Amino acid sequence: MALVKNDLISDLKATFKKMKDDRDKASNSDFSEGIASACKSYIEAGDITTMDGGTVSSGVFAGSGSGGITLDDSLMSDEIDSAISDMQDMTSGGDAVLADAIFLGLNEMISKGEVETDVEGSTTSPSGSPVEPTSGKAKGRGLSCTDGVTEDPNNPKDFVGKLKKVFQDMIDKRNDEDFNGDTYLAEKLADIINTYIATGTVTTSGQGALSGVTGTGKIA
């Protein structure tokens, strides 16, 4: 699998459409859980690859790993839910609160994700002689992404600033003929998330026979 932005766009659009179609029955949780679920599916579809190395019982190991990450989307939806609740009593500034919550929720979810990779490589004995190919599992905690708050919407790393600008653009464009707010938000939010997640790095620790091996890599 891989990170597929178009799949994220489709899932976000489906969430917004459901909110509109079920306007009388839709709840804040439908919105927050829909966004969180879309992000979870998008990220969990990504491929994590690592370069692994270290000292094991039989010598020095060098190899590579591949795998993925498992996420708890309730961590993200809870953060968004809390923000929406706070917004009920606000007369202004709600867009900024929501942008912050989406970022904080996403970061909470990915930072606590469970990473697991299958590692393969070879071990060189202390005498310098190669030994049998070595393989095993490695595990890690979380996806670490570049800070998404720079207060500069023109900075590609600025998640919150760019999302605030999207919300403002939606207000400015709402009366434009043929403007579709749901499609616009889905595409722009997916762009922002995709750029942010692409900065993600992981660190893993070898398990069992690979104890002592560390892996570092990215998601794509």
Image (tube, helix red, strand yellow):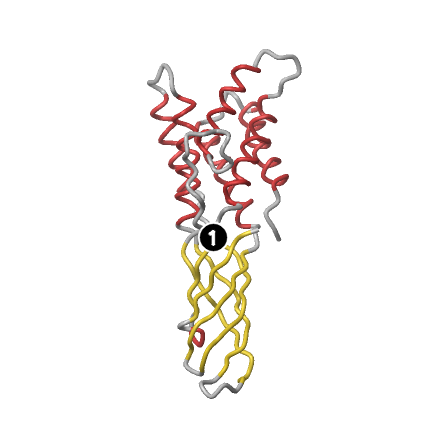
Q: Which amino acid is tagged 1?
A: Thr
Residue 10: quadrant of the picture: top right
As displayed, is residue 165 above or below residue 209? above
As displayed, is residue 74 above or below residue 68? above
Q: Is residue 149 left or right of residue 6?
A: left
Q: Residue furthest right?
A: 178
Residue 195, x across and y down, in percent: 54, 40
Residue 174, x across and y down, in percent: 56, 14
Numbered marks: total: 1
As displayed, is residue 106 above or below residue 60? above
Residue 47, x across and y down, in percent: 57, 55
- Which residue occupies the foreground of this view, 101 or 192? 192
Residue neighbourhood size for the residue with mark 1, other residues' Cα within 10 Å, grouped as few (<14), some (14–19), many (≥20) = some
Residue 93, x across and y down, in percent: 38, 19
Q: Is residue 163 left or right of residue 17?
A: left
Residue bearing the label numbered 1? 201
Name the residue: 45% across, 73% down: 210
- Circle 1 SS class: strand
- Which residue occupies the foreground of this view, 24 or 88? 88
Name the residue: 55% across, 71% down: 120
Residue 54: quadrant of the picture: bottom left
